[in-house]
Amino acid sequence: MNKAIGDRIDSEMDGLISDLQTMIRQPSVSAKKHGLVECANLISHIMQKAGITTEILNLECKENDIPPLVYGEVKSKVNPKGKTILFYNHYDVQPEDPIELWDFDPFSGNVIDNYIYGRGSSDDKGELITRIKAVESFLKTNGDVPCNIKFIVEGEEEVGSPHIEEYLTKYRQKFACDGIIWEFGYIDEKDRPIISLGMKGLLYVEIIAKGPARDAHSSLAVLIENPAWRLVQALNTMKDNAGKILIKDWYKEIREFTPNELSIIAKEPFDEQKFKREYGINKFVNNVTGIEVCSAFVGMPTCNIAGLFSGYVGEGAKTVLPSKSMAKIDFRLVPDMNPEKQLDRLQKHLKENGFGEDIEVNYIHGERAFRTPSTDPFVKQVEESANDIFGTAIISVSAAGTGPMYSFAKILNVPCISVGATYLYAKIHSPNEFARIDFLNKTTKCIVNIIEKFASSKQQDS
Amino acid sequence: MNKAIGDRIDSEMDGLISDLQTMIRQPSVSAKKHGLVECANLISHIMQKAGITTEILNLECKENDIPPLVYGEVKSKVNPKGKTILFYNHYDVQPEDPIELWDFDPFSGNVIDNYIYGRGSSDDKGELITRIKAVESFLKTNGDVPCNIKFIVEGEEEVGSPHIEEYLTKYRQKFACDGIIWEFGYIDEKDRPIISLGMKGLLYVEIIAKGPARDAHSSLAVLIENPAWRLVQALNTMKDNAGKILIKDWYKEIREFTPNELSIIAKEPFDEQKFKREYGINKFVNNVTGIEVCSAFVGMPTCNIAGLFSGYVGEGAKTVLPSKSMAKIDFRLVPDMNPEKQLDRLQKHLKENGFGEDIEVNYIHGERAFRTPSTDPFVKQVEESANDIFGTAIISVSAAGTGPMYSFAKILNVPCISVGATYLYAKIHSPNEFARIDFLNKTTKCIVNIIEKFASSKQQDS
């Protein structure tokens, strides 16, 4: 890579860390609509400081509570009509709960040795700062960027990006680009970045079982049906012990892996023992091992209980028959499953199993899965950029997580690739989330490389 | 009944209401160890004001956090060596949660027309005030009581009276008596007091399913077993849809109803439609009807989910794979089920169904069921006392709820009878618990009657 830029990144790490701390200290929990506008303004300010022109974009709506989107742009002076790379990131974070399990204030941004702690330190403020600093390094060193740069930093990724399609549609011209670097990427325990070419989809629902009109004394359980029992019975019809989803036709539209995808899966390394140690578990779901593990990661749909609540959950005993009971369920989807269709199937399943009247399913959100073809030239550019910095990079057919990649790819019609700074065991979505400073440094350099390769590939491709 | 005493009760209702409000305004939630010592002192003060000699009794223990017991006594001047009646009540209350469903502050004691609202207004501060005021009325009118009176007011009834046996054993001599009036009694929608001769037992446990070492990103559900699913699967093995408990030998020791009990059950009225309307339900568990309803109330064991918790239960979506999952379960027991034995069976059941390693059962408490024989002369005295005030009383073989009646009956070796002031739909253990002022008045008179009949029966019996 460009030595002058690399040296600048090394010498200005304090500035990167301090900007990231500033971001972490501004809570921005989209599930609770907490601090979103404040965070968008802060991000815009940090981007401007780096030399990026920004705009706060809004959608019109009745309640006016759709979080703003931060748009950023740097025109290349040397090649203003050339290719454009777009960085998609998000400034919102997962809820900080359970707060009692954090060793620090979740919004402290505490730095200890090689680690920065805090909600969002990796996901996604840590990733975002690597993109901003890469662009800043070009501008400070050369006074220019080799290709046009755009940024989309949204505020609802952690609640399923419910308005990103609207933003993408409304600002389709503004967002036009030739390739997208996705908002995150894992780096494994051997310092190998995992370059993901896809994302799973998601169907997130709340299932509510309704019982008596009000909480009742539990002695009345002789007569009154308990909605927590009904919920347990309903949930139990949905999945078997081996992890198989029992809802009719759930797997019907799933696209088979291509031979190329299969060969990528076969090559993907995965340290099963390290993973088990890290999570304190003895075995995997359905006892999968070897290539099955990677296949599951990139291609298995799930039905996960993300939350359960009913009755009294405080200290000691309360003998209550609760009036309702709730489960939050997230289903990961793979190509070509359609969340609306899967929701219909779930509702039909519950009705047919006798849970029609007293159980209701509330749709929270849905996203489709997407995979960029592994043969796209952009894949090679990103892979080479990462190899240059990290030694070895791993290509993965799809991440196990979810993001609105399908919407971006469909509306902007470009390849999307995930590459980033997040250590595989960085406790994202969990207490004590952290970022590794060495990875923030290397990923910033990797992004610089990607911009350079992407810019020069322009001349070859167009 | 004694007219002078009855008139005094009527004319001094303001004092009763105001003392009850004072009690309600002192929170005393035993599950949270909130305000217990303060409440014991307050109760003692109110009893002293009524002319009752009181003592605050304590048990020695290392942590010194066993709530005190308020003991009260009035010696009969006219008959100091005669019979003694003991009133058992409790000053602790159920947790006020879910607090957002209350129309008032749960500890306000608001009076509106015929209702006093607040946690404990019926259960059990409302009941207690009727006993205190009955004794006070004797003392103020006659300067004496016709028989010896004792009071036990404990502070742990709502968490299963874990130390009442120790108190009863330690103070067996002090508490010696000839009959016990239990801490509560329902009055039905036709103003008929339900005189219960027994109580069900209870086994209260927490079932904890343990998963990964920490909360994980839910995309990892492809590999990591979710403890909420494990809990759902475990719970589902315990009970069928008809309410039958599937744990081996669960029903083994259950004592058959005697012919006398069966005839009492057959006579017990129950307004099924009113009950269904009150709780907003269409049908009863297992579609029971008629005599089955009363049989279930007095004699059916239950397995009730009192609480469920796992993962994220706040607003919106969090895609988390929780590290643990919890259910609070209360099992109502009937004679001659033994809670320790049932706990063993539950643990064995879970182990045998494959939930041995990752699921733990925490015992919270247990109590045995008890029934006073319906042929005991004390039953007739209480029934006649109630008939005199209310017109008609209903005899019931057992309440559906639980209390430490077994311990009292075993240690003090006397009959125990429940009769009280609690309207059947008074929302005890629920938001907006209330007491009916007309019932507080009538029950105070009923207690006066019971004391008189019990005192005069002495001469006949001994």
Image (cartoon, coloured by chain):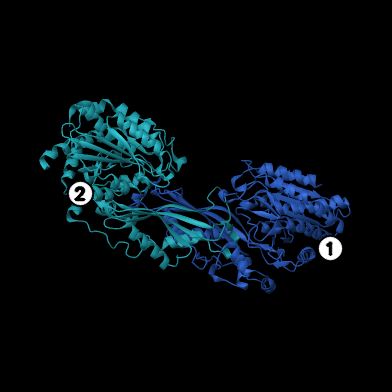
Chain colours: A blue, B cyan
- Mark 1–mark 2 distance (CA, rounded to whole Å): 92 Å
Residue B130 left/right relative to A307:
left
The chain to which mark 1 is attached is A
Q: Image quarter for residue B393? A: top left
Q: Are marks 1 and 2 in contact (CB under 8 Å)?
A: no
Q: Crowding near pointer 2: few (<14 within 10 Å), some, many (20+)?
A: few
Per the image, label 1 sits on a secondary structure element best described as helix
Give coordinates of residue B325: x percent, y percent.
49, 56
Residue B404 left/right relative to A298:
left
Disc sitting over residue A412 in the figure:
none
Residue B311 visible in image: yes
Give coordinates of residue A156: x percent, y percent.
64, 49
* Foreground residue among B214 and A71: B214
Give coordinates of residue B137: x percent, y percent.
24, 29
Residue at 79 percent across and 49 percent down: it is A73
Residue at 88 percent across and 52 percent down: it is A142
* Foreground residue among B429 and A166: B429
Query: Pointer 2: what residue?
Result: B267
Q: Amino acid at mark 1?
A: Ser
* Foreground residue among A203 and B253: B253
Query: Pointer 1: what residue?
Result: A457
